[in-house]
Image (spheres, grey):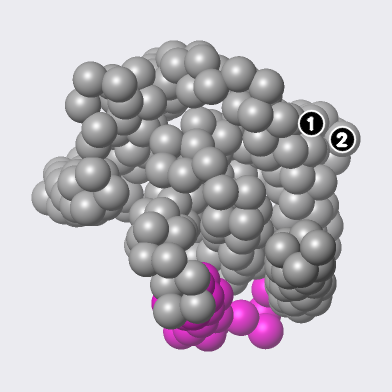
């Protein structure tokens, strides 16, 4: 009887903690959306970089708290999962910035596009993650399917980087058409986020929090991604593809080679750093991309 009561209290405590975490992320998401809706002229590169760093630091701070409050495995899984999800989110916003720029809409129209793009990212990510969690619980073999999805998504990024995807000529597309393309981008990255986080953990708390905290900072990040300096990173698709290939390898070879979290994190950072350096070293490549 005592054991049953203890178990019930533990379950209630876990449920209460999850509810509070969900509420906090919802409040942070609301603040983030309000920042997205600010006038573009109220942001500078310095402020946008500051907000981006603040949102990112908040995610790692939560990971530190999780590491201290629970077992070290959950904390480590969160750190690596959040790192991968944040890097994918940067790519998500970067491609949305490219879509909006290609549409030719500026001023208030661009502001509305960015706001609804951010709302769409939240609305799409939730159901996709919930579905992936349910599928993994249904059958552990689903992770191998996720591995194939990761490789396919990485290959698709490389194939479409030279404009073989949907094109939007300046002012020739309606706002709804642009939003439809943005929704496809959000859906594609939400689908890529599923195998990514499942490669590192099956803990529902880590899965939801790493995704939720990684999505914060859409507005400031969009402002940075739309600046000419950041657009010099024209090999970003290769960096994102390498992340997805690392995830796919970890999932498909999980039974043969249990890739460590440290190796996955160091490999991802090395890949991103390599392609960032290559982009800066060869800026003339931009002529073939934009």
Circle 2 packing at 10 Å, graded few (<14), some (14-19), many (20+), is: few
Q: Magenta residues, as a range?
A: 39-66
Residue at horizontal 80 percent and vertical 54 percent from the top = 119
**Magenta stretch contains residue 44:** yes
Going by the picture, which residue comes out furthest to the front? 1
Q: Which residue is mark 2?
A: 176
Q: In the shown orientation, is residue 57 left or right of residue 205?
A: left
Tags 2 and 1 in contact by the CB under 8 Å rule?
yes
Q: Which residue is mark 1?
A: 180
**Magenta stretch contains residue 216:** no
The location of residue 53, given as percent across then percent down, is: 45, 77
Give above or below for 273 relative to 227. Answer: above
Q: In the shown orientation, is residue 264 left or right of residue 221?
A: left
Q: Is residue 215 visible?
A: no
Circle 1 packing at 10 Å, graded few (<14), some (14-19), many (20+), is: few
Residue at horizontal 66 percent and vertical 45 percent from the top = 100
């Amino acid at each position: 009887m005592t054991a049953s009561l203890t178990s019930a209290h533990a379950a209630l405590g876990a449920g209460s903690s999850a509810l509070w975490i969900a509420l906090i992320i919802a409040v942070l998401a609301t603040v983030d959306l309000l920042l997205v809706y600010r006038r573009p002229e109220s942001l500078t590169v310095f402020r946008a970089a500051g907000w981006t760093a603040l949102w990112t630091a908040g995610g790692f701070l939560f990971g530190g708290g999780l590491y201290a409050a629970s077992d070290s495995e959950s904390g480590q899984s969160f750190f690596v999962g959040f790192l991968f999800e944040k890097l994918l989110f940067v790519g998500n916003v970067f491609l949305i910035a490219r879509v909006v720029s290609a549409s030719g809409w500026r001023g208030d129209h661009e502001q509305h596009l960015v706001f609804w793009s951010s709302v769409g990212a939240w609305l799409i990510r939730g159901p996709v993650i919930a579905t992936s969690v349910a599928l993994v619980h249904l059958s552990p073999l689903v992770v191998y399917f996720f591995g194939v999805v990761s490789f396919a998504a990485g290959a698709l990024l490389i194939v479409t980087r030279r404009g073989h995807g949907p094109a939007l000529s300046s002012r020739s597309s309606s706002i709804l058409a642009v939003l439809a393309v943005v929704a496809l981008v959000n859906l594609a990255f939400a689908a890529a986020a599923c195998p990514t986080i499942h490669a590192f953990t099956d803990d529902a708390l880590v899965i939801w929090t790493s995704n939720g905290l990684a999505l914060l900072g859409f507005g400031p990040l969009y402002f940075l991604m739309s600046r000419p300096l950041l657009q010099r990173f024209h090999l970003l698709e290769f960096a994102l593809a390498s992340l997805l290939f690392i995830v796919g390898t970890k999932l498909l070879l999980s039974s043969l080679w249990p890739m460590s979290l440290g190796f996955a994190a160091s490999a991802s950072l090395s890949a991103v750093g390599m392609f960032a350096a290559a982009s800066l070293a060869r800026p003339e490549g931009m002529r073939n991309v934009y």
